[in-house]
Image (cartoon, rainbow, N blue to C red):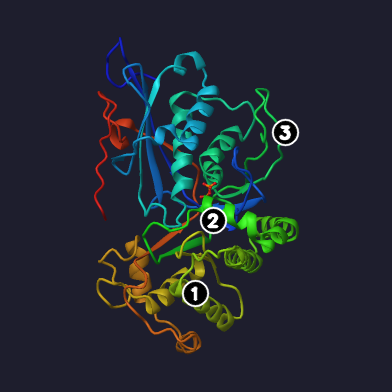
Amino acid sequence: MSSTNDDESSPIWMATVSAPTNIACIKYWGKKDAKWNTPTNDSVSVTLDQKDLRAVTTAAASIKFEKDRLWLNGEEEVGASDSKRFRACVDGVKALAADPSKWKDLKIHVSSYNTFPTAAGLASSAAGYAALVAALAELMSAKETYQGQLTTIARQGSGSACRSLYGGFVAWKAGSAEVSTEGGTPWADSMAVQIADENHWPELRAVIMVVSDEKKDTSSTAGMSTSVATSTLLQHRIAKVVPERMASIEKAFLEKDFESFGELTMKDSNQFHSVCADTYPPIFYMNDVSRTIVRIVHAYNKWAGETRVAYTYDAGPNAVLYTLEKYVVEVGALMAHYFPSPATATTAAAADGYFNDSTFANDVTAFTLNSELLAATNKTGRVPNAGDVKKIYHTKSGPGPQVLSNEKDGNLDLKTGLNTYINTPK
Ligand code: DP6
């Protein structure tokens, strides 16, 4: 790698990558070992396409940097570079650098932005920490000593981030404290494993209903800790429910069995939110709009006589709907009917940016919903109301992190290593 500043006495080394979000079908909720950020149970997720939802991170190292610095969405996060999560990622990757002595004493600058709401239950920390680890690994030409080692580092940034280092359908195996690396790091097998890549099930689609783009009020970390301390349902889930569901959903995904995949996904989302309700004091992430989407999904599947769409909710009110290509326009039209664009107060206007994807917006607008379907979904009591949903994303599964160009896509100045990203609200 050549330096970006042509300064032989104090070169700047730089790398830029993008990383995807992932949305779990079997949820991670609960930490076994908070120090190493390992989970109480296995989990599995779909990695989403980076076209619309991604974190873009530039990492740089230079002898001329006085301290580690981090900018997030254009703002410097003072002190964040001392955080346990950030340190675990930087120091973890430094230890795997091709030439560790070159990087040992160099300070790091990082600038990262998300193309979607941060901390609103859209897996922004997953994309962010996956991008951080991937950018550092690219910068320092890090080499894993075993497959999946980088995911054990990303896991220490944010648990769900380990799954964003691979595309497709990715499990996070809980692992055990007894398995350690040569260097003595425990939990070496608490890592992500790719079950199938993004080309395995090309018909799979995701429709994301952004119900709120505001920061959630109970962080996942805080919520999990209270759930582990107080929820007996969580203990039952860990011991009895998740092991069976993991096996069944892997089989369903590999066999492209949407009926089973969808049902397991919905049941697991429901159980995760039931664990939140069983936590003392209880935690509520879903709201009335979220629950209305659940009702409409069930009414639609019942009308269809099969599972055509499945919802899942993370630690926030936004719905992620998994469906298949052949139903995705119908699903989009149904959702746009009940949740019209706030800008136009009409169904699915293509031009106003309500949809991320204008072709999809046009297809949805041109689609005529079956009147019997509407009669069935009207029984949920939902009356169309503009503004309840802020934006609808249409996407599919995609690959893991991608290396980008520092010149064209980077967020740090090539000569100074200072942030260049300016946040322009969309
Ligand atoms: C509900 O990965 O954000 O999205 O490890 O504390 O950073 P930390 O938690 P985080 O939790 C994600 C929880 C979830 C479920 C999931 O993604 O599996």
Question: Looking at the image, is mark 2 or mark 1 earlier in the sequence?
Answer: 2
**Real-space Cα separation, disc 3 to disc 2, in angstroms:** 28 Å
Describe residue 57's horizontal placement relative to residue 140 as left or right.
left
- Of 213 and 406, which appears nearest the observer? 213
Element carrying mark 2: helix
Question: Looking at the image, is mark 3 or mark 2 earlier in the sequence?
Answer: 3
Residue visible at 36% across and 24% down in the picture? 67
Percent across and percent down for residue 160 are 54, 47
Q: Are marks 3 and 1 in contact (CB under 8 Å)?
A: no
What kind of residue is marked 2?
A: Gly
Percent across and percent down for residue 91 are 50, 26
Task: Tell me the tag on residue 395.
Answer: none
Question: Looking at the image, is mark 3 or mark 1 earlier in the sequence?
Answer: 3
**Real-space Cα separation, disc 3 to disc 1, in angstroms:** 42 Å
Give residue 409's quadrant in the image: top left
Answer few, some or many: residues within 10 Å of disc 1's Cα (few below 14, many 20 plus, some between 14 and 19): few
**Label 3 beta carbon within 8 A of ligand 1:** no
Residue visible at 44% across and 39% down in the picture? 131
**Label 1 beta carbon within 8 A of ligand 1:** no
Give residue 3's quadrant in the image: top left
Answer few, some or many: residues within 10 Å of disc 3's Cα (few below 14, many 20 plus, some between 14 and 19): some
Residue pointed to by mark 3: 179
Q: Are marks 3 and 2 in contact (CB under 8 Å)?
A: no
Residue pointed to by mark 1: 291
Element carrying mark 1: helix
Q: Is residue 327 above or below residue 299?
A: above
Task: Tell me the tag on residue 223.
Answer: 2
What kind of residue is marked 1?
A: Arg
Answer few, some or many: residues within 10 Å of disc 2's Cα (few below 14, many 20 plus, some between 14 and 19): many
User: Residue extending furthest top?
Assistant: 9
